[in-house]
Image: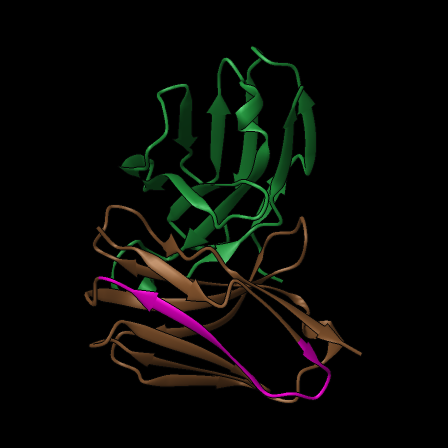
């Protein structure tokens, strides 16, 4: 059974810092890993998708890496801004009988 | 703009009632998944539909049921509502449920409150 964990559960940083969010999964047989952002009470916005054959993806100030063999992914946010404050969720897809298995999320606060 | 729309956005129901939530998937997507997200937790998988057939189900009781229509839009029905059903219900669509086509696009969610 696939299980996804995220560390830390919450993070508070001053504006301008670079930061790393961690995601771990127990079954390395995945199709994709996807990072999402969720604002309070809102739906999920897709940030980055990494296919199982890829090692990383970049979009603007965001960079996500994938190490499938060790069951780990990191989301790197450069030069953080108050507008980055949100919950960040990682999710993996695979042959589980469901589309995605989600982690519990990391709640990020970027202080001005 | 993801193209996935959910209705209604907010809903208040009384315990014991029934509710229907709706999801319009992104154009060309044949897979729709439903998730329940309690406050402060990650989304929990309810079930998934592929080409109008349910092809996966999470640990939810039978009073949670669904449908997918020929245009791949979907409904989530919950009977005999309980207070613990209060949550954000999320719908996601993807091209497929297998392989590299599983990138998911989510709607804005329906906030259900059971009183």
- Look at the picture and state if B76 lies above or below A63: above
A37 is within the stretch colored magenta: no
Question: For this rendering, which residue is in front, A33 or B41?
Answer: B41
Task: Tell me residue B45's x, y (percent).
Answer: 39, 42
Identify the hue of chain B.
green
Residue at the (59%, 88%) spot, across then down: A18
Q: Is residue B11 left or right of residue A30?
A: right
Q: Is residue B47 left or right of residue A89?
A: left
Q: Is residue A91 visible?
A: no
Q: Residue furthest top?
A: B16
Task: Tell me residue B62's x, y (percent).
Answer: 35, 20
Question: For this rendering, which residue is in front, B107 or A65?
Answer: A65
Residue at the (37%, 75%) spot, across then down: A73
Task: Tell me residue B37's x, y (percent).
Answer: 52, 43
Q: Is residue A12 left or right of residue B73?
A: right
Quadrant of the drawing holding the C terminus of chain B = top right
Task: Tell me residue B13's x, y (percent).
Answer: 66, 19
Q: Is residue B88 left or right of residue A51?
A: right
- Look at the picture and state if A104 lies above or below B52: below
- Look at the picture and state if B62 lies above or below A42: above
Highlighted magenta segment, given as a residue range: A13-26
- Look at the picture and state if A2 lies above or below B91: below
Question: For this rendering, which residue is in front, A35 or A19?
Answer: A19
Q: Quadrant of residue B8?
A: top right
Query: What number of labels is visible?
Result: 0
Q: Give the main secondary structure, helix, strand or loop, of the magenta stretch.
A: strand
Identify the hue of chain A.
brown
Residue at the (67%, 83%) spot, across then down: A80
A17 is within the stretch colored magenta: yes
């Amino acid at each position: 059974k696939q299980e996804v964990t995220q560390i830390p559960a919450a993070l508070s940083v001053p504006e301008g810092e670079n930061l790393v969010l961690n995601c771990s999964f127990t079954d390395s047989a995945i199709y994709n890993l996807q990072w999402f952002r969720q604002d309070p009470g809102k739906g999920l916005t897709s940030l980055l998708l990494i296919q199982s054959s890829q090692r990383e993806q970049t979009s603007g100030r965001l960079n996500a890496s994938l190490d499938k063999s060790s069951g780990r992914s990191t989301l790197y946010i450069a030069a953080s801004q108050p507008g980055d404050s949100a919950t960040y969720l990682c999710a993996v897809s695979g042959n589980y009988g469901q589309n995605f298995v989600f982690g519990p999320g990391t709640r990020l606060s970027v202080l001005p | 703009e993801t193209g996935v729309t959910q209705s209604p956005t907010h809903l208040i129901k009384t315990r014991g009632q029934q509710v229907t939530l709706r999801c319009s998937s992104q154009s060309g997507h044949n897979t729709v998944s439903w998730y329940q997200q309690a406050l402060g937790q990650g989304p929990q998988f309810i079930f998934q539909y592929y080409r109008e057939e349910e092809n996966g189900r999470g640990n939810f009781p039978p009073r949670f049921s669904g449908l997918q229509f020929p245009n791949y839009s979907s409904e989530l029905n919950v009977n005999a509502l309980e207070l613990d059903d209060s949550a954000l219900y999320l719908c996601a669509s993807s091209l497929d449920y297998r392989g590299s086509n599983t990138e998911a696009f989510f709607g804005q969610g329906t906030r259900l409150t059971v009183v």
